[in-house]
Image (spheres, rainbow, N blue to C red):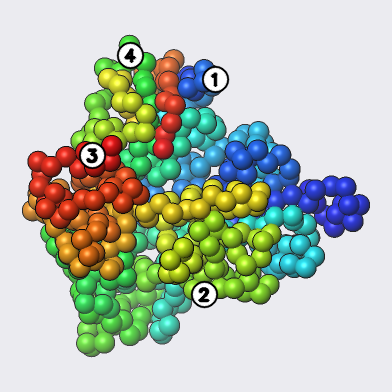
Amino acid sequence: MGDSAQADAGMVEAGMVIVGAGQGGLQVAESLRAEGYDGPITLIGEEAATPYHRPPLSKAILAGTMEEAQLAIRGAEFFERQRIALLTGMRVVAIDRSARQVRLEDGRRLDYSGLALATGARVRRLPIAGDGLDGVLGLRSLDDARRIRGALDRAARVVVIGGGYIGLEVAAAARKRGLEVTILEAADRLLARSATPFLAGFYADLHRGQGVMVELGAKVVALDGEGGRVSAVRTADGRSHPADLVVVGVGIVPDTALAEGCGLACDGGVLVDDCARTDDRAIVAVGDCTARRTGTGALLRLESVQNAVEQGKSAAAALLGRERPFTAAPWFWSDQYDVKLQIVGLSAAHDRMVLRGSPEERRFSAFYFREGALVAIDSVNRPADHMVGRKLLDRKAALTPDQAADETFPLASLTR
Amino acid sequence: MAKVTFIEHDGLEQVVDIPTGWTLMQGAVQSGVAGIEGECGGSCACATCHCYVDEALVDSLPPPSETEEEMLGCTASERRSNSRLSCQIRVSDALDGLVVRLPEAQS
């Protein structure tokens, strides 16, 4: 593997270095091989675990229905066979762009000919008193999930701060274990940053129907503790919500420290184009750590598996001088109780919504239009609508609101 | 534990030992079987782990859930009578010797 002595010899290709061994980083490595790259690949991860699926952390892992070993995306032999050198439990502390080297926490330096940043994100902390008490946990990593699972085993009263997807999934898992659960959301609805008011209302009803206390407009001002352990969450209206476990799910902060440290352009994420390229042609970036400047100039921040995987494929191609833009409609899913939500597209700018199916029966899709054009679909227990919807959006099919609302109209007829 | 044979569309065979309780998808992907993507990690949300299960055994499996049934209508390759999503099939000793064929494309 390239240390600087080898690079000085001038004969050994430095190879590709990937910082961050989550889903996006691993995808870069795999896609480099799939694209025919034969040189050295080093995949460096801060966590001790080999690359794993994060989505089950807030679902099956908390529910206890999945073993940790099942989380691994690839087994050890795969890395050997693909000749991907995996360095786990190792932090990269700096990038030297002029020398094309990364510096590891143990002092080693690795040369790179191409570098991929897949540094992910960190849990956003609450800037309030008591954030550091025992029993106040965020959820991002396998270690976090282990801590929350352990705490759920002992807890009776759980307060979830933040009504986003992570908060809602944790609430569902805790409720399924029979615990008393309160969700405190500062905004006037759930999913305020990511979903429409209609969908947010559906989820508020769903959780309340399951016995979760959903408090909207609840601004948390302090966490109270006893003997160093959290005991209650105080809100601005003067109320105190008793808790022996507090899960903070108020979003993530893209980890841009390395990128900023070496002068790469960042704007709420490492700035990349549709091909995952940063402003340094030798450096690409993928996944949760990125903010994408799309072809239309808009800045897009996505936190999803699809984004990590697709940008990973784009990034590998870009490192080999090829253009493989990621332009597909964003998709995402969330599982809570027996409700499977699948989202495709971006609904934020919609001016019209029509329903297909029945929210009362928890089986419907909400189709969102802007100026007559389909922009997004939220499907609840309607996976076929979602799958067809991806094609409709990617092909810019001319679906009308009337057709979308008409159950007898075959959506798939517009994708052929 | 079951020994499961995955046959890629190009004929390449790979035999994988899969622990009881795991899904066919988990066993295949961890072992690097190329013809299965399993992008969503097993949530039945992406239909990229489509497979054709040995005709002789397909009827002995628990039938697809409503969600799997719908997702099977949306696979990239042709759906056949023995089509399943491999993330929805839990391995037991009874599946030892199972042969699974993989489609030409998953996405």
Which chain is home to disc 2?
A: A
Residue A168 x, y percent position in the rendering: 28, 61
Which chain is home to disc 3?
A: A
| Camera-side residue of A298 and A132 | A298
Q: Residue at x 65, y 38 (%)?
A: A36
Disc 4 + disc 2, Cβ < 8 Å: no
Mark nearer the N terminus (2 vs 3): 2
**Helix or strand or loop: what does disc 2 sit on?**
loop
The answer to whether tags 3 and 1 share a subunit is: no
**Helix or strand or loop: what does disc 1 sit on?**
loop
Mark nearer the N terminus (1 vs 4): 1
Q: Nearer the viewer, mark 3 or mark 1?
A: 3
Q: Nearer the viewer, mark 2 or mark 3?
A: 3
Residue B12: mark in rendering? 1
Residue A174: mark in rendering? none
Q: Is residue A13 above or below residue A292?
A: above
Please name the amino acid that badge 2 sits on. Answer: Asp
> Gap in Å between the C-alphas at discs 2 and 3?
39 Å
Q: Is residue B87 above or below residue A119?
A: above
| Residue underneath mark 3 | A412
Residue A10 x, y percent position in the rendering: 89, 52
Please name the amino acid that badge 3 sits on. Answer: Ala
The answer to whether tags 2 and 1 share a subunit is: no
| Camera-side residue of B100 and A142 | B100
| Residue underneath mark 2 | A267
